[in-house]
């Protein structure tokens, strides 16, 4: 049952305390509706969901039935969560002419891209991204739709059951408030040559990062480069195959390219993957032989492919764990928005940390060579270093997050007659948490140690 219960997968709470049932016959068509103040996409019982965002119905709040902790809803909660995470709300363009023209423009752009200067590229990309600030869904600068739905369901379970709290396994090891992951995509010779200085800069702040290499672009040097990064404690992953923008152009070609990518991954021992320009089709990931992927943005307003997974937490796509990008890329910040400060990054960090999410960054050695950009990146590292202790953040490599999240998915919460206990791999690093209602809001408290002998920490409010 756990595999199909998105709520239990998210919180890792006992299944008996969080059962969901669908009341009524679900509509044949999928569409938009709202629940708990958040946008949903899926099938709805009793009403026809809207095909358009912002014009759908509000689903009834639901209720609990006897025995307690069974939440009745007019929709499939897990289906809606997975629709959002896997971007199934994105509809193909109904304008075939525009779609054809867009494909032709994309082909022409990537054909010319190697010879285009950054000034020309950013001008073309600004034209293509016009109107991004009017996109209503996903929300900008961070979309917490999945977390809002989870909190809404938790509130209904607490209200309907009359329970004082619902226990669950905290999201991060040792009770960390949130997690920070730094990644660098290497896209050209100048960026490759700057990687040594970038490692020095990261190391000066005690931050280890992951470098993504384009395998066909590096050729015979690929193994040598990977060894250099790993010798200094950094992680190495693959970044597309050749970064031509056509990895997901058609399924047949994708399968061929995926086989080559998988061969590179086996040769180098890479666990993670990121597609070029964040292009993606999540339902094709079964052809990739990786433990985790990093190609899906939280909200793709400034990405080549719009959409987004609407969550700040890792989630599984079949056997692959997705580590979504939850902050703006350095290229978009500097060259699309023209913003040479960390103000937007700081805002996103705060929003994600308030939801106890995964704070992930993509910066590029190619774009940090210039002094002004490198100064901004240094300001970011300074800010993160300060937050490390004041906000109890866990700084981790992608492979560490992958390992933790997989172990957490196998942990079980049991009661020994006196207290709740966690069993499973890495359980000594896990912490029991409790969800409670305080003034009508869901708040969390995390027990201080694995043996639960110490009193719980003060509740941490969930920001609405």
Image: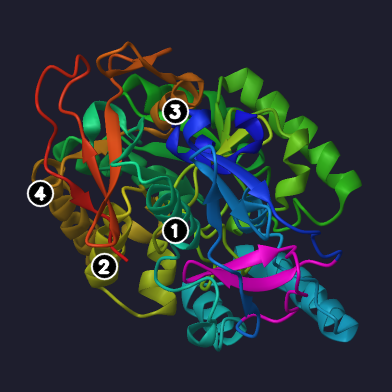
361, above or below 169, in the image? below
**Structural distance between the alpha carbons of marks 3 and 4:** 24 Å
Give the camera-side residue of 81 and 57.
Answer: 57
The span from disc 1 to disc 2 (Cα, nearest Å) is 24 Å
In which quadrant is the C terminus drawn? bottom left
Q: Position of residue 379 (x, y in %)?
A: 16, 59
In this view of the protein, which residue sits in the foreground, 228 or 316?
316
Residue 399: assigned label: 3
Label 1 sits on residue: 152
Q: Is residue 43 visible?
A: yes
Residue at position x 44%, y 70% from top? 332
Residue under the image location 80 percent in, 77 percent down: 93
Mainly helix, strand or loop, the magenta region?
loop
Does the rendering let one see residue 294? no
Q: Decide which of tag 1 and tag 2 comes sooner along the chain.
A: 1
- Earlier in the chain: of badge 3 and badge 4, it is 4
* SS for dot 1: helix
Mark 1 or 3, nearer chain start: 1
Foreground tag (3 vs 2): 2
Q: Which residue is mark 2?
A: 347
The answer to whether residue 258 is left or right of residue 270 is right
């Amino acid at each position: 049952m756990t595999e199909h219960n998105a709520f239990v997968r998210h919180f890792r709470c006992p299944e008996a305390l969080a059962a969901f049932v669908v009341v009524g016959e679900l509509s044949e068509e999928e569409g938009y509706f709202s629940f708990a103040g958040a946008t949903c996409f899926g099938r709805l019982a009793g009403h026809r969901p809207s095909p358009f965002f912002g014009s759908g119905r509000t689903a009834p709040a639901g209720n609990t039935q006897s025995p307690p902790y069974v939440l009745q809803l007019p929709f499939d909660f897990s289906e809606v969560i997975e629709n959002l995470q896997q971007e199934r709300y994105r509809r193909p363009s109904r304008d075939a002419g525009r779609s054809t023209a867009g494909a032709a423009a994309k082909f022409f752009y990537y054909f010319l891209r190697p010879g285009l200067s950054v000034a020309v590229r950013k001008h073309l990309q600004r034209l293509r991204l016009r109107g991004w600030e009017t996109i209503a869904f996903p929300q900008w600068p961070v979309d917490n739709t999945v977390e809002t739905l989870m909190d809404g369901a938790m509130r209904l379970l607490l209200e309907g059951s009359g329970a004082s709290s619902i226990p669950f396994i905290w999201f991060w090891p040792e009770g960390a408030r949130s997690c920070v992951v730094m990644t660098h995509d290497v896209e050209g010779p100048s960026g490759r040559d700057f990687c040594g200085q970038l490692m020095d800069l990261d190391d000066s702040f005690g931050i280890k990062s992951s470098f993504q290499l384009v395998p066909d672009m590096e050729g015979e040097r690929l193994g040598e480069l990977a060894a250099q990064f790993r010798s200094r404690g950094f992680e190495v992953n693959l970044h597309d195959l050749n970064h031509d923008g056509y990895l997901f152009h058609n399924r047949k070609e994708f399968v061929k390219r995926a086989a080559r990518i998988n061969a590179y991954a086996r040769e180098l021992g890479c666990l993670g993957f990121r597609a070029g320009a964040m292009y993606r089709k999540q339902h094709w990931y079964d052809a990739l032989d990786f433990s985790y992927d990093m190609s899906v943005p939280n909200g793709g307003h400034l990405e080549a492919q719009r959409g987004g997974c609407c969550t700040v937490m890792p989630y599984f796509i079949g056997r692959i764990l997705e580590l979504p990008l939850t902050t703006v890329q350095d290229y978009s910040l500097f060259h699309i928005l023209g913003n040479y400060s960390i103000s937007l990054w700081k805002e996103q960090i705060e929003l994600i940390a308030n939801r106890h999410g995964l704070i992930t960054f993509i910066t590029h050695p190619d774009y940090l060579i210039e002094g002004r950009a490198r100064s901004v990146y240094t300001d970011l590292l300074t800010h993160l270093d300060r937050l490390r202790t004041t906000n109890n953040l866990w700084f981790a490599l992608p492979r560490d997050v992958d390992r933790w999240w997989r172990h957490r998915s196998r942990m079980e919460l049991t009661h020994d007659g006196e207290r709740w206990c966690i069993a499973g791999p890495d359980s000594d690093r896990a912490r029991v948490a409790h969800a409670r209602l305080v003034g009508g809001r869901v708040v969390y408290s995390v027990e201080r140690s694995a043996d639960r002998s110490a009193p719980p920490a003060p509740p941490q409010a969930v920001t609405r």
